[in-house]
Image: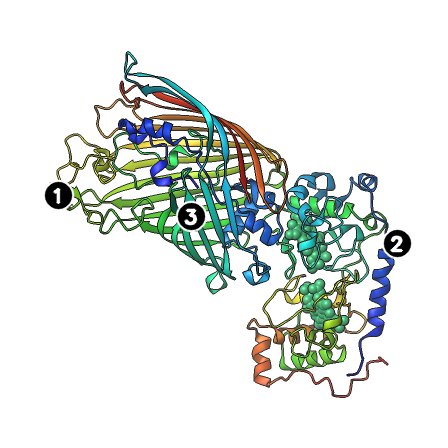
Amino acid sequence: MRMGTQSRQYSFAASAIPLTLLAVFVVLSVSQPANALPAFARKYGLRCSACHESWPMLNYFGQKFKDNGYQLMNDRDAPIWQNASYWPITLRMTPFWSRESTSKAAVDTAPTGEQRMTTTGFNLSGLDILTGGTLEKNFSFLLVPSADEEGAFHFESVNVRFDNLFKSPWLNVKVGKFELDSFISEKRTLTLSESGGEFQLFHFIPVGDGNIFGQVGDNQIGAEWMGHSGNDRTRLSAAVFSSTDGNVDVPYGQNSYTGFFAGSQAFSTGKLGVQRIGGYAMYGVAPTTYLTSGGVPLPGSGIGNKSFSRVGFEGLFYLGPHLDFQVFTQHGEDSAWFGACYGEIMAGTCPDTNNNTTGILPAGARNPTWNGAFVETHYVYSPQLTIFQRSEWVRMSQQAFATNPSNLGDIDNYVVGYRYNPFMTSRAGFAFHNEYSWIRQRGTSPVTGTDLSSNSLLLGFDFDF
Amino acid sequence: MRITLHKSLLCTAAVVMVFPLASLAQQTKADFEARIGMESHIGHVTGHAKSAQYDYRRYCVGCHGDRGDGMGENFPWVDPKPRDFQLGIFKCRSTPTGTLPTDQDLSDTIGRGLDRSNMPPWNVFTDQQKADLVAWVKHFSPRFASEKPGTPIQIPAEPEVTADRIKAGREVFARVQCWKCHGVTGEANGPSASTLQDDLGRPIAAFNFTEGSRPKCGSSDQDLYRIFMTGLDGTPMPSFADNIKPDEAWDLVFYLRTLMSEPSKEKAIAKQLGLKPVDTNAPAQPSGQQ
């Protein structure tokens, strides 16, 4: 799970704010995916490779296990089958060395106010404590207290799931804080580095936009129905959650909800393997008008809901057992209000004064829209060695204001690396991880507003047990 | 308590089982190499042992071991123990007891998994993957190099369920003494239940019909028929092919349904009839034993 997910992502949207740069360098946190659970391997006697293409990325068998509520659907699922001392706990952390370089840091002594800055050093990721499994047959849970690298905890995932209601795999209901049901999962991405560790499209926010609520990659608090065919070839889900970007205590709207819908179909293509194609749609509303007290917006008082949407295609294509491609696309649109930086005015994303009390849209504001895609490739030489790349592009198709450069905020992101597990057992996971990533966002350097790029080289030891 | 186990059955089973066990030496790498060309044929899919190496390593080796001898790292922790493929003895077969299963049988088993064991259902695999794995499983045992699989038993068309058939099935259950191991109510608490061992001398429990768990070798009526007419080789669960006529076998299937927890037509009829568990003290039907 991304460390300090909501607060810590490499948010280009906020790069208008000089704080971002600080964040990039101070945080340097390895984006930490979750949900590789040796606790499950121990419970069932399976090696990591049974469920993970390369941990933490799931393969089809692992996806089915997850969709069944962390159950293999045999009679060893109930915890009563385990030795009484068995605890379904997994800890994951990554010590690493990295080199982080950004093309334009705001520097007092630089003639333009900006210059390249490069830092190398040893570092730590945050810690994920993952516990999950079954409380009883068909009663599943997941609890993930997650600490950033300095030990500050938050709850990344907390949910219970009622599986196979009325004995039907089509009726599973989850309540709590959970990952949205995109089968291409960012929580399980193989990439760890600062600028490559997350899917840009899962968190994309146009420059100057006030909508933090449409992030597919952030765990959300709500309820989800999920259904699948017995062999998991067909998967469908619908979730409804508060438009809070996963934050507790409903700090934004009085009545603001978002829905996320996903569906996919897998089919066998003989020797090539099982292919899966599908799509997702996220549609939600979030507030733009808040009551204030002493000029400060009151949490939970938000009204004046405005809408946003994200829709796209997902595909997972295998060319035999060694090579696969993940394809993810997105068309995103925010209400012009968000485009004009209304919405999240609590945390400083937008100025406090952007409180929509008049209902009059700033002149010239339009709905920002964009398109994006990424292709991630895995060459799985053996269950122990995987070489990967991801190429991702986000292009604005309409800026909130016609005065913005048309490519403002466009992103290009490339990642390559490999992950080597020197051993593979049914008890613990250890990976030697080496990765290089490069990212560029148009027009977002802190002083001159020109293109900003950064790169990251990481050598890490990822372990969980 | 009278000792009335089907000695003849157990003896046949014992001879069939113990003989190959005794004659089998540990297989070496060279033996496997020699059989690496092993194929399987399932429908129109041909499986190649060689092509399964990757999947075997990814999914199976932790239990079944590099040499297919069931000595993967989970061996100490798993009960029942992972199968030793070198023995070439399989529980789920459509073929008579003592013979090798068909490729289709093995493929079905892999897809279905074995309930009441750690062997998961691998039903996400493609037919090709399963066929390759079948060939790979076979290449561990010399039996598949020298013997042909048995001829699948004939299963006559399933008749209509009637009260008479269920009552007749109850008689069969009593006569051939399924209850010795499975108990009169099907709760796996018959007089022999606590003494049961598999062919490797490991304790084994009889199937409890009442708990809602699935039979390892399939849960359809046809599967149940097949289970007691072919037996689960390597276990005390014998084949009753010599003792139960095909028509009676269907009666018995219907009776077994009345013991199971899932609602069924058979269960409803049994309730209506007020059907009682078999009485083990009633004089045994003349059926040739002792």
User: What type is the residue that disc 2 sits on?
Assistant: Ser
Q: Is residue B152 above or below residue B157?
A: above
Asked if labels 2 and 3 share a chain, the reply is: no
Residue A75 seen anywhere in this rendered image of the structure: no
Identify which residue, A190 or A282, lies in the foreground.
Answer: A190
Judged left or right of residue B11, residue B48 is left
Residue A15 seen anywhere in this rendered image of the structure: yes
Q: Is residue B29 above or below residue A28?
A: below
The part of the image, by quadrant, that contains residue A152 is top left
**Is the Cβ of the residue at disc 2 closer than 8 Å to that at disc 1?**
no
| The N terminus of chain A sits in image quarter | top left
Q: Which residue is mark 2?
A: B23
Identify which residue, B192 or A42, lies in the foreground.
Answer: A42
Estimate the x, y position of residue B288 in percent, counting from the top left: 85, 80
User: What type is the residue that disc 3 sits on?
Assistant: Pro
Compute the Cα span from label 1 to label 3.
35 Å
The part of the image, by quadrant, that contains residue A353 is top left
User: What type is the residue that disc 1 sits on?
Assistant: Gly
Identify which residue, B222 or B262, lies in the foreground.
Answer: B262
**For the residues carrying marks 2 and 3, which lies nearer the camera in this image?**
3
- Circle 2 packing at 10 Å, graded few (<14), some (14-19), many (20+), is few
Q: Which residue is mark 3?
A: A145
Residue at 80% x, 38% y: name it.
B33
Q: Which residue is mark 1?
A: A294
Residue ranking furthest to the bottom:
B282
